[in-house]
Amino acid sequence: MFSKKPEAPFPAPQASSKAMAGATFSILGADVTVTGNIAASADLHIDGTVLGDITCASLVQGESGRIEGGIVADTARLAGTVIGSVSAGALVILKSARIEGDVAYDNLTIEQGAKVEGRFAPRESEPKLAIAGGTDVLELK
């Protein structure tokens, strides 16, 4: 009768498999302004303002988000204002997006109503340095 432990009223929270794997997700809220460059190895969600360049694995920009700087990401989903160049493997530009700058992509989706002032071009592979056999000539491929 007295040896029984009482049950906890709420179960203990359990970490998700993504959190246990060390993956993170960072959010900049609508009331946040960052001045400076941002580099993230994981996912980044921006609803606020960034005055600087962004490099990350995956970028999601909300409608209230404003980025004044370049973006380099594996994947990007843009819904706010971007003033600067964008380079992304898989890029989705939503109808609320306003981009002033050149856009480089591997895969591109644009919703009807999005506004882009700039040039579109497929991303190019990184140039490779080759040395011609035994000479002093360098060639970029």
Image (tube, rainbow, N blue to C red):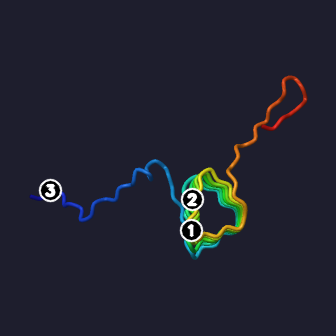
> In this rendering, which labeled residue sits more in front, label 3 or label 1?
1
Residue appearing at x 56%, y 72% in the figure: 63
Q: Is residue 141 left or right of residue 94?
A: right
> In this rendering, which labeled residue sits more in front, label 2 or label 3?
2
Going from the N terminus, do you reach mark 3 or mark 1 first? Answer: 3
For the N terminus, which image quadrant?
Answer: bottom left
Kind of residue at disc 3:
Lys
Judged from the image, the secondary structure of the residue bearing numbered disc 2 is strand
What residue is pinned by disc 2?
109
Kindly tell me whether residue 132 is visible in this rendering. Answer: yes
Q: Would you call the spot at circle 1 few (<14 residues within 10 Å), some (14-19), or many (20 or more)?
A: few
Image position, residue 88 (x, y; %): 63, 54
Q: Are marks 1 and 2 in contact (CB under 8 Å)?
A: no
What residue is pinned by disc 3?
4
Q: Are marks 2 and 3 in contact (CB under 8 Å)?
A: no
Judged from the image, the secondary structure of the residue bearing numbered disc 3 is loop
Judged from the image, the secondary structure of the residue bearing numbered disc 1 is loop
What residue is pinned by disc 1?
112
